[in-house]
Amino acid sequence: MRVFTTGTRLAAMLLATALLAGCASTKEEQAPDVAEGQLYQEGRAALEDGRYTTAVNRLEAIDTRYPFGEHAEQAQLELIYAYYETNDWEAARAAASRFIRLHPDHPQVDYAYYLRGLAAWEAGRFSLESLRLIDIAKRDLGATRDAYSDFRDLVRNYPNSQYAPDARQRIVYLRNLLARHELEVADFYLRKGAYLAAVKRGRWVIENYPESEGTRDALAVMVEGYLGLNMPERARESLQVLIDNAPDHERLDGRTFDPRYVDAEVSA
């Protein structure tokens, strides 16, 4: 049994008091009760200085107190960026979606689309990916799909936006990533003997990510899946497409397909 001396108890009490005081001091500050213009100037200054928590505080106050004020629209737009810089991806996406809904004709609405995509992009990242300890393609990619959709919306609706070139580059990366993820799932189905599910995943990649690097592997998945389903004619059709598009694919030996999990062969 642990025994506390009077001095130890006193030290523990002082430490607890200090921790409580520290917690109290880190509570979000209350925005000053000042006019809209001053709140906006303080919010802008905080953004420019990199004091993003203060910027959020001031811009949120404008949104709450002066929803129809002179600076309301611009404050809503800049609040998206402030949320983004504080790593509050969910709040940034919600604020961007709200801005797009309320101000679809705003001259900077493309910026809201772009920030919404960036927030989803960051939410889908994993810190260990750069160390190659985690393959992001094997993880739940819900936020990554959101980013892909957001950037596509930006490019489709505002092809001449200054943010469109960067969005297009990110789309290429995300498309390949999402295709890889589907192929990881398809491979799992093949290993478990769920051949129909594997074929559907392969077809999904081809139909939804036709420009991705994974389309050739998707064809290979379909060949093997059809072999597992004992559908040699469909397997042969898919094999011919694979040969036409990727004659040097690793699963090919000339015009013969070498399955990874299924005990069968097919030639075109």
Image (cartoon, helix red, strand yellow):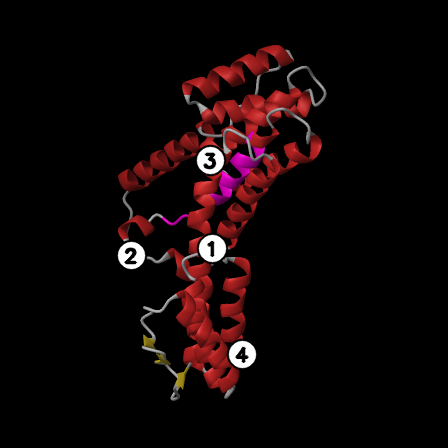
Q: Residues within 10 Å of mark 4 (few under 14, many from 20)?
A: some
Query: Which badge, 2 or 1, comes first in the chain's sequence?
Result: 2
Q: Please identify, in this view, whether the residue under mark 4 or under mark 1 is nearer the observer.
A: 1
Spatial CA distance of label 4 from label 1 is 24 Å
Q: Secondary structure at mark 4?
A: helix
Point 54% across, 12% down: residue? 41
Q: Amino acid at mark 2?
A: Leu
Reading the chain from its start, which is encountered first: label 3 or label 2? Answer: 2
207 relative to 133 in the view: left or right: right
Q: Amino acid at mark 1?
A: Glu
Image position of 24 (left or right of 250): right
Viewer-nearest of discs 2 and 4? 4
Q: Mark 4 and mark 3: span between their CA atoms?
A: 39 Å
* Number of the label disc, if any, that sits on residue 165: 3
Instruction: Find the magenta span and give its range.
Output: 111-126
Q: Residue at x 60, y 22 (%)?
A: 75
Residue 164 location (% of width, % of height):
51, 35
Residue where numbered disc 1 is placed = 211
Give yes or no for residue 121 being in the magenta stretch.
Answer: yes
Image location (x, y in percent) of residue 184: 42, 67
Whole-Å distance between the Cαs marked 3 and 2?
A: 30 Å
Q: Residues within 10 Å of mark 3 (few under 14, many from 20)?
A: few
**Furthest residue in direction right, as rendered:** 68
Q: CA distance from mark 2 to mark 4?
A: 31 Å
Tell me which label, 1 or 3, sits earlier in the chain: 3
Query: Which of the two discs, 2 and 4, labels the residue nearer the N terminus?
Result: 2
Q: Nearer the viewer, residue 108 or 10?
A: 108
Q: Amino acid at mark 3?
A: Pro
> Where, by quadrant of the figure, is residue 179 drawn?
bottom left
Q: Which mark is residue 133?
A: 2
Q: Residues within 10 Å of mark 2 (few under 14, many from 20)?
A: few
Q: Which residue is mark 4?
A: 196
